[in-house]
Image (cartoon, grey):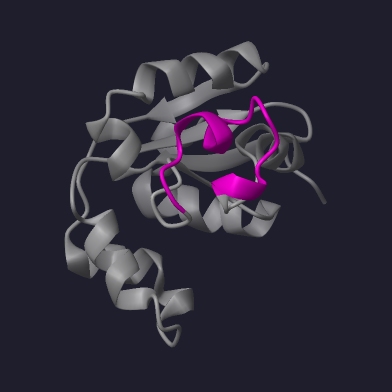
Amino acid sequence: MPTNKTFTMIKPDAVADGHSGAIIKMIEEAGFRIVALKKTQLTAERAGQFYAVHAERPFYESLCTYMSSGPIIPIILEKENAVADFRTLIGATNPDNADEGTIRKLFAKSMQANAIHGSDSDENAQIEGSFFFGNVEQF
């Protein structure tokens, strides 16, 4: 059953480049309500835990190094049809293929440094949100 919440994370490149405010503004203007938000930095070990699903992939080590390279901003969002609507707002993983006006088209540098993460399912939104936030913060 679809939920009305999703998880996102503004990645180190976008935070370092000062795009967090503009990205958050786009999210809110698209009708999402911020339920929980914080600024933190992952260790390589914690990044490895978050991306454990990719552990066998060739890009896993570089992904963990990148995601622990600077502060990130994890956020839980709420809106009807949250996961699908948010995936549309952020655009394709590869910014070269992202639609005009999407977050990745505007702020991404590359496929890895693509400015923002967005959960791809209701189940993953719950898992990923719980990785960063407790129940009190999520509601």
Q: Nearer the viewer, residue 128 or 119?
A: 119
Which residue lies most toward the front here? Answer: 96
Is 23 left or right of 80, judged from the image as shown? Answer: left
Question: Residue drawn 39% across and 55% down?
Answer: 131
- In the rendered image, the residue lying farthest to the right is 1
Question: Bounds of the magenta span?
Answer: 95-110
Q: Closest to the observer: 84 or 79?
A: 84
x, y percentage for residue 50? 38, 64
Q: Is residue 91 above or below residue 112?
A: above
Position in image of residue 2 (x %, y %): 79, 46
Question: Dividing the picture into quarters, in which one does residue 84 lie?
Answer: top right
- Verify whether residue 12 appears in magenta: no
Can you name the residue that lies furthest to the bottom here? 56
Residue sitting at x 38%, y 17%: 21
Residue 44: percent from left, percent from top = 19, 65
Identify the residue at image location x=74%, y=34%: 85
Residue at 57% from the left image edge and 53% from the top image edge: 94
Residue 19 screen position, x and y as percent: 36, 24
Q: Would you identify the image quadrant in which residue 86 lies?
A: top right
